Image: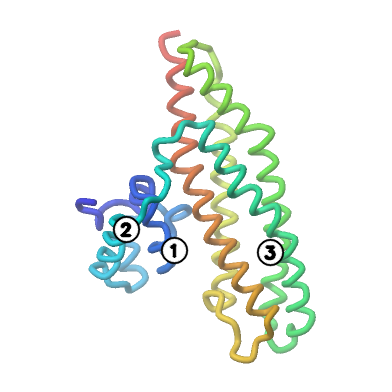
Amino acid sequence: MTNIAEQTLASIVTSHHQTVPVLEKYNLDFCCKGKRTLAQACTEKGLSIEAILQELELSTAQSNASDFSSMNAEQLIQHILLRHHFYVKQSMPTIQDHLVKVATKHGERFSYMYEVLNLFMHLRGEMSMHLQKEETILFPRIKEVESLHHFNQKRNIDANYIFGPVEVMEKEHDEAGDVLYKIRELTGNYSAPADACTTFKVCLAELKEFEEDLHQHVHLENNLLFPLAEKMLTGIRSSL
């Protein structure tokens, strides 16, 4: 991990996936704002770069996390579907139910929870459509391109066959990240009031987990799967 301070957050996580918990701990966004260097991100948040570097070094020394960078496209897609798409579909109804209870019971005292509820309801609708587009359009196309690439078959496929939907997905990733960033701001980094009920505390913990899952989900797609798909597409279109 040489010169890691000058590496982008996205490249750090791509090369060393086990660093994710450390970056999450300090709210260093490696997906939607992953183009910043570690040094820049630490300066923006007033964090000690030396302390962060020590934790990152320790995480890579101790962890035996999966090496996602060695996976092919189909393996990445399978992991994304089983780990992240399944989680999102299962968790969103539960989180929304808890938010409704909290806003109904405690909205008069903590009015920001009404806005949190509205933001999450909007996010739920957008995420449901987003997952459907990935599962029915983009992922099947990526698998098709990988199959052609594997058998070294050239095809005159329009670049937008992959680049088009990828551009849309990345834009939607940014929008989802912005919504969750706003929710984190409204809730004071998911901090429950001193006299919060159990549902209130659980709800905020669920939202925090949801954002962390989104960051890992987006990282695997933006920084690994999509570039791999674009590279393979370029390969099968060359020399035609």
Give the label, 3 or 1, closer to the camera.
Answer: 1
Q: Which mark is residue 150?
A: none
Q: Amino acid at mark 2?
A: Gln
Q: Which mark is residue 62?
A: 2
Residue at left 40%, top 39%?
A: 69
In this view, the residue farthest toward the bottom is: 195
Residue at left 54%, top 38%?
A: 167
**Which is more toward the observer, 40 or 90?**
90
Q: Amino acid at mark 1?
A: Glu
- Answer yes or no: is residue 35 visible: no
Disc 3 to disc 1, C-alpha distance: 20 Å
In this view, the residue farthest toward the left is: 2
Q: Which residue is mark 1?
A: 24
In this view, the residue farthest toward the top is: 240
Q: Quadrant of the C terminus?
A: top left
Disc 3 to disc 2, C-alpha distance: 36 Å
